[in-house]
Amino acid sequence: MCTGVYQNINNSGLEYPINPSLFQCWRKDYKRPESEAWVISTKDKLAVLSNCTNSEWKDTYRPMTDCGINGLGTGYREDSITLRKVKKTLTNYHPRLMIVNFKQPDASGHANDSVAYLQGIMDTDNYIYQLWYQIQNDEFYKDKTTLIVTNDHGRHTAGHLDGFVSHGDACDGCRHIEFFGMGPDFKKNFVCSTTFEQIDITCTIAELMGVNMPFAQGRVMLDIFN
């Protein structure tokens, strides 16, 4: 979702993506400081999204990171802490590009805790509201910022294997994710019926930001644009 290229990758934070991310391409194109691009995540392993192994891009134009308890390999933290970190970063640095990860409801799903799973959905909805409220009450961002809400995977459909507990195969539930976007460039009160993919999210953001993504393989989601 950050590179616009599908890649089988170690899921434990032990392997970097091959291709440069949207953050790296944006910083290179606009010659912006690292403090204006951020990866903020409850999961420490997602710090790998800040770099790649491509020899021409490795260790260059990286975004800032605030992941897990204290960086890669330190373990997960609570989503409420991540929310506070995001709010503080928006206030102190006014980044122009950011990805945020919350662990819920995924963590509760894997724990087979349906009550916590549903609570995780409601809590995350509330976090999103709080962030949008802050954005719309900051003159730096107000009415000129795009917010996209999505997930990196679905879950097994009811009756398939262990249901909502797991994910990772080609069932209908696993292959379908949500995509909600709002901002000045998107249609309002519009439900898109076109099938898009995760890599298309990258290319759509690149289109919004005017970024050249030389390796991305997705397409721009033009259907949702004004």
Image (spheres, rainbow, N blue to C red):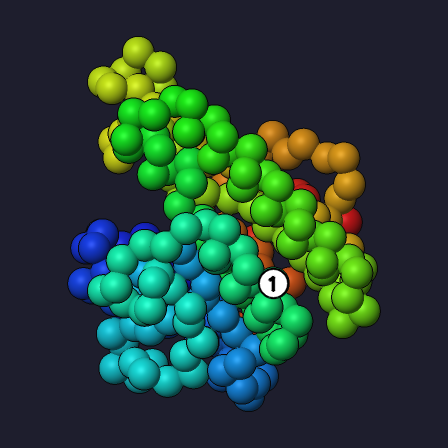
- Compared across the picture, whether 1 is left or right of 225 comes to left
Q: Quadrant of residue 70?
A: bottom left
Image check: 6 left or right of 196? Answer: left
Asked if 187 appears above or below 4 in the picture, the reply is: above
Name which residue lies at 66% across and 71% down: 91
| Residue 53: percent from left, percent from top | 25, 74
Q: Is residue 124 left or right of residue 72?
A: right
In the image, 118 versus 206, the foreground residue is 118
For the question of whether residue 86 can be seen, the reply is yes
Residue 144: quadrant of the picture: bottom right
The answer to whether residue 172 shows anywhere in this view is no
In the rendered image, residue 77, in percent from the top left (x then y), is placed at: 37, 55
Q: Is residue 121 left or right of residue 222?
A: left
Q: Nearer the viewer, residue 96 or 199?
A: 96
Give x and y (percent) for residue 222: 64, 49
Mark 1 Cα shell of 10 Å, populated few (<14), some (14-19), many (≥20): some
Q: Quadrant of the N terminus?
A: bottom left
Residue 56 falls in image quadrant: bottom left
Mark 1 secondary-structure assignment: helix
Q: Amino acid at mark 1?
A: Lys
Residue that label 1 marks: 87
Q: Exactly how many numbered labels are in the figure?
A: 1
Q: Residue furthest top?
A: 159
In the rendered view, would you say 8 is above or below 106? below
Say which residue appears at 81% left-offset and 69% top-offset. 139
17 in relation to 43, above or below:
below
Which residue corresponds to the image point at 47% horizontal and 56% vertical from the top-left? Answer: 81
Taking 3 as reference, is 180 above or below it? above
Residue 194, how many percent across, how many down? 57, 34
Q: Image point 61% across, 47% down: which residue?
A: 128
